[in-house]
Amino acid sequence: MPGKPKLHYANGRGKMESIRWLLAAAGVEFEEQFIETKEDLEKLRSDGLLLFQQVPMVEIDGMKMVQTRAILSYLAAKYNLYGKDLKERALIDMYVEGTTDLMGIIMYLPFQPPEAKEKNLALITDKATTRYFPVYEKVLKDHGQDYLVGNHFTWADVHLLEAILMAEECKSDILSKFPLLQAFKGRISNIPTIKKFLQPGSQRKPPPDEKYIAQVKQTFNV
């Protein structure tokens, strides 16, 4: 019997967090090997385990996978969260790319200098409420189903919920003008595997604190 997927990354969110979310949504248990020092990272590199010298890296099915998008696509397909046909996959890809763009802006906020944070918070709120969330609100309205694609739970739903919760950490009432997204958040949060992942004590990581940010900057030279 194959072992659990093993995730190599820092002990924080970053680009690995969406991978944790997707595995958790699929009900798949996983192990984590945290990179805590420059030496930990250099060992992975010197052992030839990082194809492009970068993490995230996931050991799964005899592979040492790198590149976040490749890992996520593989997991979505493996665990039947990638739609039933090519058109559904195309929609999932489009929606995921949108939420990835939004989460990318949010992800780098804690690494900005203090004087830039207020401006960047305003930028996040503006983009979330004028560019991204209106799209998903309209998709849910036009589609008329509980989920973004087809009438089944997919990677796109997982990714959107992750983005919503990240955006709410920046502005708690950010969904106030999006009633369908509010209902979507409630539905997806109550899917048993997601509900479990949202409970205290899960492998979901908290927002970055100063200690984590300092460690990442030192380990990854950012």
Image: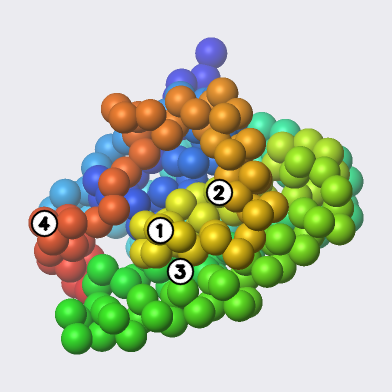
Amino acid type, mark 1: Ser
**Percent position of residue 176, x then y:** 55, 61
Gap between marks 1 and 3, in whole Å?
19 Å
Determine the residue positioned at 24% across, 56% down: 208
Pointer 2 local density, CA inside 10 Å: few below 14, some 14–19, many at least 20: many
Amino acid type, mark 3: Gly
Gap between marks 4 and 3, in whole Å?
21 Å
Sequence-first disc among 4 and 3 = 3
The reply to whether callout 2 and callout 1 are in contact (CB within 8 Å) is no
Amino acid type, mark 4: Lys
Question: Closest to the observer: 46 or 132?
Answer: 132
Q: Is residue 76 left or right of residue 144?
A: left
Which quarter shows the C terminus? bottom left
The image's mark for residue 104 is 3
Sequence-first disc among 3 and 2 = 3
Residue hosting label 2? 161
Secondary structure state at the residue bearing disc 2: helix
Question: Closest to the observer: 8 or 191?
Answer: 191
Q: What is the quadrant of residue 87 in the picture? A: bottom right
Residue hosting label 4? 211
Secondary structure state at the residue bearing disc 3: helix
* Looking at the image, residue 138 lies above or below residue 129: above
Residue hosting label 1? 172
Secondary structure state at the residue bearing disc 4: helix
Sequence-first disc among 4 and 1 = 1
Q: Is residue 167 left or right of residue 142?
A: left
